[in-house]
Amino acid sequence: MKEPYVELSPEVSEEVRQTTCYMCACRCGIDVHMKDGKVAYIEGNRSHPVNKGVLCAKGSAGVMQVNSPSRLRSPLRRVGERGRGEFEEISWEEALSEVTDRLLKIRREAPERLAFFTGRDQSQSFTSYWAQEFGTPNYAAHGGFCSVNMATAGIYTMGGAFWEFGQPDFERTKYLMLFGVAEDHDSNPIKMGLGKMKGRGAKVVGVNPVRTGYNAIADEWIGITPGSDGLFIMSLIYELLRSGKVDTDYLSCYTNAPFLLEGGDGERSGLFLRDGDGKPLVMDRVSGKLVAFDGKGVRPDLRGDGKHETVFGKLVETYLSDCYAPEKVSERCGVPVETICRIASELAHVAFEESIELPIAWTDFRGEHHEVMLGRPVSFHAMRGISAHGNGFQTCRALHILQILLGSVEVPGGFRFKPPYPKPAEIHPKPHSDCHVNCPLDGPHLGFVMGPEDLALKIDGRAARIDKAFTWENPLSSHGLMHMVISNAYAGDPYKIDTLFFYMANMAWNSSMDTGGVMEKLTAKDDEGNYVIPYIVYSDAYASEMVAYADIVLPDTTYLERHDCISLLDRPISEPDGAADAIRGPVVDAGRDVRGFQSVLCDLGHRLGLGGFVTEDGEAKYKDYADYIVHHERKPGIGPLSGYRGEDGSLSGRGGVNEDQLDRYKEGGGFFVSPIEAGSSFYKPWNMSYQDWAVGMGFYEKPSPYVFQLYVEPLRKFQLAAEGYGEIQPPDHLRDSLKSRMTPFPEWYESTDEDDDYPLHALTQRPMAMYHSWGSQNAWLRQIHGMNPLYVPLRVWREHGFEEGDWAKVTSRHGEITVPVALHRGLNGHTVWTWNAIGKRRGAWGLGEGSPESTKGFLLNHLIDDLLPLKDGERVSNSDPVTGQAAWFDLKVRLEKVSPRKSSEPVFEELKSPVGVGPKVVSFKVGR
Amino acid sequence: MHPAPSVIFFTSFSGLGFGMLMWLGSGLPLLWGLEAFVYFFVAYALSVGGLLSSVFHLGNPKNGLKAFSQWRTSWLSREGICAVLSLLVMGLYGIGLIFLEENWFLLGYVGSVLSFGTVFTTSMIYMQLKTVPRWNMLWTPVLFMVLSWGGGALLVGDENLSLFLLLLGGCVQVVAWLRGDKRFSEVGVSLESATGLGSRGRVRMFESPHTGTNYLLKEMVYKVGRKHARKLRVMGLLLLSVFPVLLLWFLGEYDWVVWFSVILHVLGLLTVRWLFFAEAEHVVGVYYGKR
Amino acid sequence: MTLLPEKVDKKLGLVIDLDTCVGCHACVVACKGWNTENYGSALSDKDAYGGDPVGTFLNRVHSYEVEPPLGASQTVHFPKSCLHCEDAPCVTVCPTGASYKREEDGIVLVNEDACIGCGLCAWACPYGARELDGVSGVMKKCTLCVDRIYNENLAEEDRVPACVRTCPAGARHFGDLGDEESDVSKLVRERGGMDLMPEMGTKPVNKYLPLRSRDEGLGVPALEEVASEPTGFMRWLDKVLEKV
């Protein structure tokens, strides 16, 4: 019988538009297939450096994002009480004049009364520039509640961090350890990398209390108890030191291990011994003299000079302490002694017995020529699981020390930086907060402090910033503390503000600790009946929970309706073998009265007369964001995009403005790669051919080789201040904490109080098919994750007599929630967890009545206080004492079985949706 | 399996209708004129009504005519053909009896066999499904046919025959339940075999592919409480068989008894047919940890 | 039509590596996207933004936990779509001939122009590979992207099913399982590819590669102490430097 006719070669699309995904922070290249001018199908761009053709669930579901019913349609002005969602639609002119009037007054009177914080912003170099031109010290993005510990520990220790700044050498590594990695910014590259490793039979070890995702396919799972990763790592270090399995050549050449430390008690105690030029000194094995560490031909001696202790000597002393012996840490970590010893032996074996060599010659910064590149094929990757603790900074530091001791950073098979990294902390900007009326700020807001003199303090010693970043509480808070802004603004601590201006940050829901408290603070009124936080401007593309708390809503476009740049000045998309940046171009017309937020900032900048946004004759300098991307120059020849620079577009890195730059990017697939030659591809911090290339690209002005900082001297400076040395002194109540937390070698400390009332650690992680709250409005993705149970380990499950379908009351020191529970056997016995940000407030995101997100979904955030319990009557944020990273994962709870509920609790009043509810049925083909 | 009203009514009423036609075709009883019309009308109402009810189970009935094409492999296609042929043949036969005072008995026998075939092919639609072990046994067609004969006999008013067949039907139903209860484990489907992971250890569902429901769960994963099912079985059996048999045995001489028995039997039939679907477990359920 | 072909020229299918699948659902959504726009009617979603959303998907990823007799529970992500069985029961039960297995490559398809939406094929399938679309009323199933794999409008390298093209971890492989020398056949041989529910007798073409060993050490020698007693840093360092 004849088979029916099947059209085997249907037209795939009328046109393919190539742009960059924004369904999460991974920034993959996408091919958007168009039919009838509409988005028909999205797939990965095969030639893109990030995803090489693959695409995750979120990326493919982008079709439903441009069709999302929760897209805002027009500027809104609040008409009811704050927090109800009652708005009137207004014109852009009305909205912008109102905001301009308000901001003009602030700028004229006290610029710090504007707090401008952007959430999951991918244009931070632009938004920070705007804030700098405005002159408020109060700017940051969301890094403080995301993963600043990871970034800061990485940059202070080795001049670069994980995620977009570096990755394992997936091509060559034979052993990879993942610490606290659930889904990540680098989501597709990690999946691709793990796939490659699986193909070669290389070993992957997952260290995570929860065995899902990457940890599910790890060849070995170590179900560690939360908060103890640092202890586990230090125990591995102990084992490696005990057996002498460290790369002494690497340590002597490329780290500060041979640096000599000043002894004694004085104000220089524990600082590096330096020469007249301020260069740290080492004992040279060749000359037998004390010389600057980076001199030509110097061979630093780890033994030192016999008079001063070397960094390495101190390190060995620190980590060979009994308190890090496997027998001592095993119980707290929940990892058997044999496992710790075995993992250490496997690391040592692969690093030293299975080392690899690439026949590539290179020359280091001391002028020494090397015939080959030696590789230690063990690698590491880590994420929020280890960083979102109150001991996260030192834990991340410990991990980097482990990497460095094994000689596996920037070597074949190890961990590799992605340009513009490596870049040492010293050559990053320092924080600036000096603000004056009608003036730009004195420099970039965020940066890397090198000592107490760099803190953002006012003359009276009080915090200069509303989030108290760069204060004694959290001296190294390089990403700011966005999670403290509302709380501090409400408390008037350190001062009162007038306007909160947020972008893409769902602070009234999943992006805040103590969500209910935040809602109260946003709506609180003073005795006169005025809002305590007087004015709130919010920009978002969708009807998120936060929208309801704004006085003015500036509707943003979706990612397929806008221009953007993913810039080397910001968070790049580079690969270890090349610098790369990318653009977004509008694929479809918005068809609503919405504007890209960055374009709105250009407009506001002009209306406010900000220096960087007006021409000499007072005209708008940039028509819109696209105009800015092409024409803005941070320094002469350095702009947001590195590709197709110069008049004819022939230059990359440095070069003048090219009017056709965006078109050239679009022709090129939406991205640009400047490849790194093989001779520059490893040993980058010390490799002179890489250094020269980096200068050519404009990453820095002169070659900047450096050595890794096992011992972080700036931390010691804060300790010295706490000990009473120096002019800038901390408040007394923080002295002890500074001494014990700012140790120049990471030391492990318990970041939560032992409290038998709350015996269980409670965690969240991001599901791979859903990015925070954005996915719930997506008809496809919300079917995969429409609700979230609290996963409970078998021990606890049995203890409480739970059965399928049961509910539990979860109580922390701060609050309680009532939620559905489910069994998870692959889970650390002292831990419960759930998927992050699936729960939604009723009325938000265009979802209809009874949506599982609002009935069975829930947030753990209600249980997390944004402040630590009062100590000496001081308000101290629930953050890492070094960096201010929100300590989400320090949460401890107890469970209690309760009768099943109709809805998880707490239940908040339903928001009035500014966009109505989505359609009942979705069923269409584009182009039919 | 989801006990959809459409399939319950379809199998129940078409079973009764074709059961009646089978008896009518074989001349038990041989009726004429108006009386024949009434009986044929009832039989047609039941069988055609049942068939129409099944149309409600279709997602896309406009292609319905194509359903007669695949008789070589498909029991559903065969059932359609048998149903139409038997309705045509019995229609002609009926016209002879009602209007022409002709008993084309050969046509009647053919129609009777076709009606029997219709019920048999219906039952084979279920019996053939390896994926529903409870149905996938010889007792399924036996049950369908005995109940169809019994119900048909009751409807054509043959007390003795129906008494015997309903008793038999009750017994077959009990056997089918008892045998059916064991079928799933006999087939040996488990989450271990379904995933191929059994050699490593016991397998349990951790997360469903979707937090809500879907077609598969709605259509094929239906959970009926064990206690609830037991009650329904007792009730169904009493109505289907025990009460009608007792009534017919002791009070068979009264006309109302037959009609009352019909009502009880139909209620019983609907109950056991509901259970036939509701208690049947599809192997796909194991993938969802629903077993 | 619903007679299964006596012999197929090729046995195109998927090989799914359970050892590598991270459970990201990328294949699920890429499939939804492609097949909404292409073969047959759109894959609909009812109550798309409401309390009980039910959509049609041709590929779904389950997650299981395996409890070995010793050691920690193992999590396995388990993608499942049509297995394009050699003895496909879904084909033979179809009354209209809408369901059929292609002679040229063994792909099982539904001809929507002939489908009456009776659902019997879905009942006959042990794997839950078929879903009746709530809006179009016809049966939907994996087409192995028959409109991609031969599509002359696509670049040669893109002529694979959408799920395979998108899979970030490379856990999905596509090829001719009837050709002993094909990459997929080799993978199945090397890794012990297996059938799902063999007791159903469906002879699935798609194969699943089992998990490799979990939670076992590399078997390398234990670390030995450098200096047997604590004698200070210098002694320790001398020992270390001697060894290197």
Image (cartoon, rainbow, N blue to C red):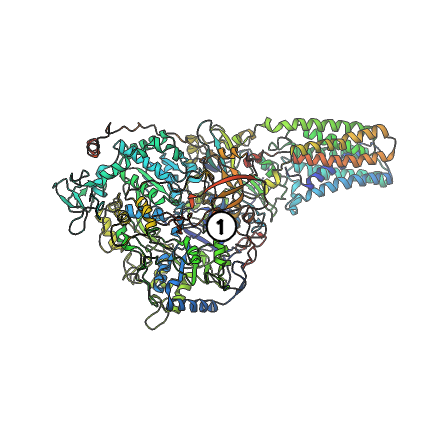
Label 1 element class: helix
User: In the rendering, at what x and y percent does residue B5 appear?
Assistant: 69, 41
Give the tally of numbered discs: 1
| Residue depicted at x 64% and y 35% | B72
Quarter of the image holding residue C216?
Answer: top left
Quarter of the image holding residue B12?
Answer: top right
Q: Nearer the viewer, residue B248 or A101?
A: A101
Q: Nearer the viewer, residue B121 or B244?
A: B244
User: In the rendering, at what x and y percent does residue A43 appear?
Assistant: 44, 49
Q: Is residue B233 left or right of residue A62?
A: right
Asked if residue A103 is positioned above or below residue A879 in the image, the reply reads below
Asked if residue B196 is positioned above or below residue B65 in the image, the reply reads above
User: In the rendering, at what x and y percent does residue C121 appear?
Assistant: 60, 38
**Residue A764 visible, this angle:** yes
Asked if residue B237 is positioned above or below residue A272 in the image, the reply reads above
User: In the rendering, at what x and y percent does residue A173 appear?
Assistant: 32, 38
**Residue A250 visible, this angle:** no
Quadrant for the N terminus of chain B in the image: top right
Amino acid residing under circle 1: Gly
Q: Is residue A687 left or right of residue A574?
A: left
Asked if residue A911 is positioned above or below residue A880 in the image, the reply reads below
Q: Nearer the viewer, residue A494 or A72?
A: A494
Q: Which residue is mark 1?
A: A775
Quadrant for the C terminus of chain B in the image: top right
Furthest toward the bottom, the residue is A617
Furthest toward the front, the residue is A872
Q: Residues within 10 Å of mark 1 (few under 14, many from 20)?
A: many
| Residue depicted at x 57% and y 27% | B188
Quarter of the image holding residue A360?
Answer: top left
Question: Dot 1 falls on which chain?
Answer: A
